[in-house]
Amino acid sequence: MDLRRLSHVVALADTLHFARAAEQVHLSQPAFSRSIQAVENDLGVRLFERDIGDIRTTPAGEFVLERARRLLFEARCMQRDVDLYLDTQLGDTAFGVGPFPAATLMPRVLSELRRQHPQVALRVEESNWVLLLDRLRAEDIEFFVADVRDLPEDAALDVRPLPAQSGRFFARAGHPLAGKACSIREAWQYGVASTKVPRAVMEAFVRALGLPAGEMAVLALECDDFAVLRAVTLSTDMVLGATDAAVRAEVASGELVPLNVEGLPVLQAGMGIVSLRNRTPSPMAVRAIGCIERVAQEVSDNVLP
């Protein structure tokens, strides 16, 4: 089985367009068409229906495509494993982080990794879990750290849970609600800012706010950049939903204060480390994951200053 030609089948299935697929794999369209035909001839089945202006995979094509993707993935993994075997160096790595782990874990994790391995290049992408999952599946990053409660069940993913981080509502010092008990409705009226909130937490907000059936609770500001959320909260009367660890410095300095919100659902960041199952991590990725797990445990135990 020619893996190069199988990659052409995958490209056509992804684009459903001969010209775009040919460009993607750096072939002329006639050469690309011959490659697809060669695979079909070798297998003895038609993989694509070629109507005028319309390309569709056949049932046989879907059957073959699933296995082609698996074979190509295994081939890439094998090449990577051989490269790692031959290379005694740690190697560079790229991984992703969600907003809360970026704020609570990464400053210390990255500082430690740089001190211990100054020769290694690290690339860290910050985003929400939806976009990071796309990057992981495209093999642009080795793993990501984020809230995993809404992550779809997928046998291709390996999820290593991290200790939960507790959270609550915060506001700037001098906020009208600071220093007194308030209801969740009162806090919500000032506008709540947070990162992308898991579905279960939003449903808990709906119940706590007593909203009618079918009505959703809406954040006044949703942003993946926690530094932006923090800055807006410090300069307005907006209420910030965050983990204690994410705003520890601001609470210690008195810039932010935790609000006493009656009826507030239990807030936690359920984080985990997500990677592709059966893909051997680089030595540096193993070191990074170990460092993240250790720092996450210490943050959860509240042993950090």
Image (cartoon, grey):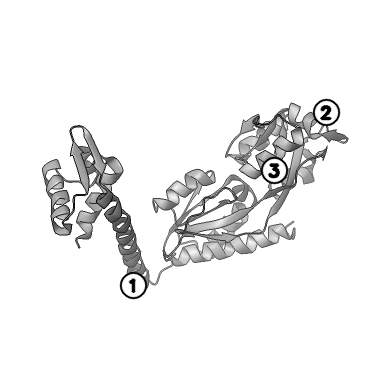
Judge whether 278 appears above or below 247 on screen: below
Q: Amino acid at mark 1?
A: Leu
Disc 1 target residue: 86
Q: Point out residue 271 in the picture as x, y percentages from the top left corner.
A: 61, 53
Q: CA distance from mark 2 to mark 1?
A: 63 Å
Assign the N terminus to one quadrant of the image. Answer: bottom left
Q: Is residue 240 visible?
A: no
Q: Which of pointers 3 and 1 lies earlier in the amino acid sequence?
A: 1
- Residue kind at label 2, given as amino acid type: Pro
Work out which residue is located at the far front of the displayed protein and give it: 59
Q: Tell me if 42 is positioned left or right of 68 in this view.
A: left
Residue at 80%, 29% (x, y): give it: 186
Q: CA distance from mark 3 to mark 2?
A: 19 Å
Please state the total of marks drawn on the protein image.
3
- Is the C-beta separation of discs 3 and 1 under 8 Å? no
Residue located beneath label 3 in the image: 242
**Which residue is identified by label 2?**
176
Please state which of residues 83 and 195 is positioned toward the viewer in this rendering: 195
Residue 213 percent location from the top left of the image? 68, 31
Front-lying residue, 112 or 93: 93
In-image side of 48 versus 97 (left or right): left
Residue 127 in the figure: left or right of residue 15 = right
In the structure shown, which secondary structural element does the residue marked by tag 1 occupy? Answer: helix
